[in-house]
């Protein structure tokens, strides 16, 4: 589910114009969406067993709409009810800022995955996200699990990389993935071609890293 007005996920998954309804329209839906309606109206297919709901720049205006609703933090959860049990995993891609779109995603989720670059400012972002998660758990989603942190663009030749990884492990000992996504030109190239790294360069270091991540996700 592309929940980010920048729509990078949608651009990655589709090089053709989107003809189906987008995430902003999912928020604006007045009545509960049924599975068959969702398939016809919202779901785009990327490949076998991989569907997505496209984002749209109009998501930036959904905040104003949500503020007028008493259930503003749980609209997405209600309107995604049809998807529960239909998929092994449902990922919601969010904007970097903590706004009502992000709060809706956290209220709908059961786990949080935070990708972070190995830079000092990333630590501040993690701490703020942890505070938000505690607030969400207390008010709207008691089942929300502790965030899991995924280091990305890791360059093991740099001293700062090891320093940041050590700090993250000290601050969040149970929240750090063993898998790390190394800095890789192949990963960057794959997005330009609209392919997963496994399809674009399946024998690359980036592909190995994402396989390790997938295996660890299944174990968790």
Image (tube, rainbow, N blue to C red):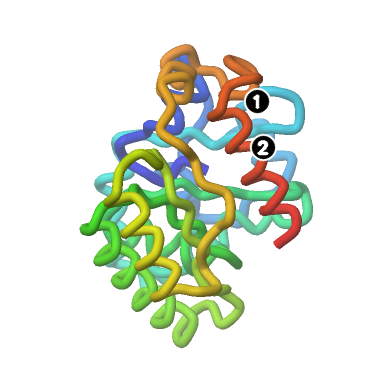
Of residue 141 and residue 35, the one placed in the foreground of this image is 141
The reply, left or right, for residue 4 in relation to residue 79 is left
109 to 211, vertically: above or below: below
Which secondary structure lies at badge 2?
helix
The reply, left or right, for residue 7 in relation to residue 214 is left
Observer able to see residue 182: yes
Taking the spot 45% from the left edge, 21% from the top edge, the residue there is 191
Of residue 9 and residue 129, the one placed in the foreground of this image is 129
**Residue 13 in the image, given as x and y percentages of width and height:** 52, 24
Of residue 29 and residue 155, the one placed in the foreground of this image is 155
- For the C terminus, the quadrant is bottom right
CB atoms of marks 2 and 1 within 8 Å: no
Q: In this figure, which residue is indicated by the disc labeled 2? A: 211
**Residue 124 in the image, given as x and y percentages of width and height:** 25, 66
Observer able to see residue 64: no
Taking the spot 65% from the left edge, 25% from the top edge, the residue there is 45
Taking the spot 29% from the left edge, 67% from the top edge, the residue there is 68
Which secondary structure lies at badge 1?
strand
- Nearer to us of marks 2 and 1 is 2
The reply, left or right, for residue 98 in relation to residue 38 is left
184 to 149, vertically: above or below: above
Q: In this figure, which residue is indicated by the disc labeled 1? A: 45
Q: Earlier in the sequence, mark 2 or mark 1?
A: 1
């Amino acid at each position: 589910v592309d929940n980010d007005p920048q729509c990078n996920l949608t651009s990655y998954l589709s090089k053709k114009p989107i003809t189906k309804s987008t995430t902003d329209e999912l928020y604006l839906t007045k009545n509960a969406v049924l599975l068959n309606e969702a398939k016809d109206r919202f779901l785009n297919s990327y490949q076998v067993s991989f569907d997505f709901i496209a984002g749209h720049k109009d998501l930036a205006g959904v905040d104003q709409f949500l503020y007028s609703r008493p259930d503003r933090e749980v609209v997405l959860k209600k309107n995604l009810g049809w998807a529960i049990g239909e998929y092994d995993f449902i990922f919601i891609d969010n904007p970097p800022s903590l706004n009502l779109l992000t709060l809706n995603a956290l209220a709908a989720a059961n786990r949080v995955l935070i990708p972070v670059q190995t830079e000092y400012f990333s630590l501040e972002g993690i701490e703020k996200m942890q505070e938000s998660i505690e607030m969400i758990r207390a008010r709207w989603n008691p089942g929300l699990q502790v965030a899991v942190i995924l280091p990305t663009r890791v360059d093991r030749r740099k001293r700062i990389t090891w320093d940041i990884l050590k700090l993250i492990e000290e601050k969040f000992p149970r929240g750090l993935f063993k898998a790390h996504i190394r800095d890789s030109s192949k990963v960057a190239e794959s997005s330009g071609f609209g392919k997963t790294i496994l399809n674009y360069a399946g024998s690359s270091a980036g592909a190995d890293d994402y396989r390790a991540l997938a295996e660890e996700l299944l174990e968790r």
